[in-house]
Image (tube, rainbow, N blue to C red):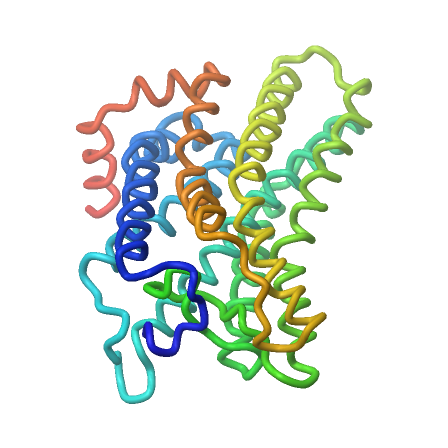
Amino acid sequence: MNASCPWTLFDDRGKETLDTLVDVTGGLSTVLSFWFILAYFNTNLKENWSYHNIGCFLLSAWIRRATSITVNYYVDRKNELWPGVSFCKVFAFFETFMAVHEVECLTHVCIERFVVAKYNAYGWIMPKKQYVMFRWLCVTFSCAYALAPALGVGGYGPDFTCSSCTMDMVLPDGWRKYIVAMIFFLRSVKPVCVMIYMLIGCKAFKKAYNDSPNNQLQRKITQDAIVMTCICLVCWTPIATIRGWVVLMQLIYGSGVFVLPTEDNVKWALLLHWVSLTPTVLALFLLDSNIQRATLQLRLGTFLGHIKNKIE
């Protein structure tokens, strides 16, 4: 993979060090958030669809990190899965799918907050089918962006470490480069604009709220959504900005012409991105008393018994 990798930011020792640090930060996020995510889906929180919606975002982020770490240890991505298809390409599809799914899940948490605020302001009841629609939209957007290279728009290639793969940041020639650039825009900039607009829009309905227990709970969940969105955007923005810069420079100067940032900038951006789940779950735990109780009251034996009953 290294021979065909267009990025020259890291030497071999630097790549090994960065791979180790990424595994450590991703592993830390995976371990610290595991019990927290179990609490979301196996306590009374699961009965509240708004909490369930947040839990789906956390689960998506957890699966992405846990899978990446597992693949790093057990699979050589330079090997071929079958003739002409390497593990790198397969992992690149999965990584692209899960990266988009993670962002889309958070986007739909923000959308759900706006829709719930509007429904409550008018005295309406939020139908459960809306939450089913949120899940399907997340999967639909993820498939659309991740499958684009398989359909001839863009490709899969190595990321900045040259030891892992994702959607190729090297733009193709001709009109396809504009389509690929648009995909990067739609999967990065558009969701951020939607998140911010939805959360700001919640305030328009704040005055219509009364002090009923349900509305007090909804205010608390909206506060959770605002805090975790801010944390994620702070952690995601550096690496998204770097990737966007690389794509933009190719649009200006031509495909394959790179204006790369420094090695340290890329390294810290990647580490901040992969560790984002840790401050998110810690902030939610400290902020929301309902989440605290659910996490502290969860018993492993009860959870395993619940799983056994479902299987039987």
Q: Residue at x 47, y 23 (%)?
A: 283
Where is residue 222? Give x, y as percent: 62, 26
Kindly give the residue lying farthest to the top in the view shown.
211
Q: Is residue 74 left or right of residue 285?
A: left
Q: Nearer the viewer, residue 231 or 133?
A: 231
Where is residue 139? Give x, y as percent: 52, 59
Q: Looking at the rendering, which quadrant does residue 127 occupy?
A: top right
Where is residue 68? Give x, y as percent: 32, 55
Q: Residue at x 59, y 80 (%)?
A: 172
Q: Is residue 209 left or right of residue 78?
A: right
Q: Residue at x 62, y 46 (%)?
A: 130
Where is residue 120? Give x, y as percent: 73, 27
- Residue 92 vertical position relative to residue 289 in the rendered view, above or below: below
- Residue 137 vertical position relative to residue 151 in the rendered view, above or below: above
Q: Is residue 203 left or right of residue 144?
A: right
- Residue 93 vertical position relative to residue 36 in the rendered view, above or below: below
Q: Looking at the rendering, which quadrant does residue 181 occupy?
A: bottom right
- Residue 303 vertical position relative to residue 175 in the rendered view, above or below: above
Q: Residue at x 66, y 46 (%)?
A: 192
Q: Nearer the viewer, residue 42 or 189?
A: 189
- The quarter of the image holding the N terminus is bottom left
Q: Nearer the viewer, residue 92 or 132?
A: 92
